[in-house]
Amino acid sequence: MNNIDLRSDTVSWPTPAMREAIAKAEVGDDVWGDDPTVQRLEAMAAERTGKEAAVFVPSGTMANLAAALAHCQRGDELILGHLSHTFRYEAGGVAVLGGIHPHTITNQPDGTMNLDEMEAAIRPDNPHFPRSRAIFLENTHNICGGAVVPPVYMAGVRSLAERHGLAVHLDGARLFNAAVALGCPATDLTRHVDSVSFCLSKGLCCPVGSLLCGTADFVSQARRARKLLGGAMRQAGVLAAAGIVALEQMIDRLAEDHANARRLAEGLADIPGVEINLDRVQTNLVFFSLAPWVPMEPAQLIERLDREHNVKLGSRGGRAFRACLHYWITPERVEMALVGFRAVLGAA
């Protein structure tokens, strides 16, 4: 990676070990269920999340939509946070393609939703209302600064859902970042949910792909949804091979990304004109903004960092930014990025 790309961990390239595994992958036809490399990846994903089965899909967005289609029927309702990825950034798929009504409640700064508000959102059995069927959670929570949602909260949601007969799905795009930050196995989080998705193509460094895990019956329904959505793949073992490397080699090292995020955040905090809450930097995401008095537009900062220092940064709207750390952003590159920030903002 020739530049210092902080826009997202989705920009991470596959590692050399992944490229070798891709080249040597044994393949079949996954639609027919006979790709051995996909089968192995799915079995590993199920084991890592403590679930019966898993299905390999092209993206996290498809995984979450397939989960909604498996848990809900047309006219049903799912409860989720107003800052959740599914509500904000997945093109309204649950409503457009699933006919499922999203019922949003407020996300707290730590990524949770108030359990009393959640329970109040559950509909009574009344023909005037959609049927409440599922609760969607997110961990780590992207918009809430990469916040880690602890197991005790997940257990509270599980208890509430059981009282009302609702399913719980976890958008675990960065599930393993949460587990590493907590110092616990991912199953400490996933045991409280009926289904969970996680991305291979973010901090785990794969070129593409996500896994959706749950009971065997749920995954059977999710496979039908994957087909409906056009996400069934043929010789997908060439992609799954990278996923196997990710699950074997890339999870524990996520702690390095968290440490690098902390170093970047602390360096940014020392630059006049940068506003940042260090307490909210828990994983590999760093959210910050330009103070109102800084005589520079956000687009100027992005353009100059790229042109003058080879640092790519994404805007979050207004004067806010997000920097995302990943495998290819080493400690040395963090320092190089900070040199760029200091030079550009020092000249503002």
Image (cartoon, grey):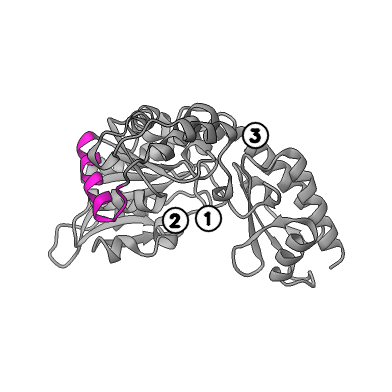
In the rendered structure, which disc, 3 or 2, sits on the residue that comes first in sequence?
2
User: Residue 247 placed where, x, y %?
Assistant: 47, 30
Give the labeled residue for mark 3.
Answer: 256
Majority SS type along the magenta span = helix
Residue 244 seen anywhere in this rendered image of the structure? yes
Which mark, residue 267? Answer: none
Q: Tag 1: residue type?
A: Ile
Check disc 3 and report its element: helix, strand or loop. helix
Q: Look at 32% across and 55% down and name the residue there.
A: 79
- Residue 263 lies, with reference to residue 343, above or below; the image says above
Mark 1 residue crowding within 10 angstroms, few (<14) / some (14–19) / many (20+):
some
- Type of amino acid at the residue the image marks with label 2: His
Residue 86 location in percent, x, y? Answer: 39, 56
Cα distance, mark 3 to mark 1? 21 Å
From this view, report whether residue 324 is shown above or below residue 121.
above
Tag shown at residue 85? 2
Structural distance between the alpha carbons of marks 2 and 1? 8 Å
Residue 227 belongs to the span the image colors magenta = yes
Q: Which residue is mark 1?
A: 143
Residue 233, placed above or below residue 216: below
Residue type, label 3? Glu
Mark 2, Cα crowd under 10 Å, few <14 / some 14-19 / many 20+, is many
Image quarter of residue 273: bottom right
Q: Are marks 2 and 1 in contact (CB under 8 Å)?
A: yes
Q: Nearer the viewer, mark 3 or mark 1?
A: 3
For label 2, the SS is helix
Q: For the image shown, how many numbered marks are present on the structure? A: 3
Residue closest to the eye, 266 or 343: 343
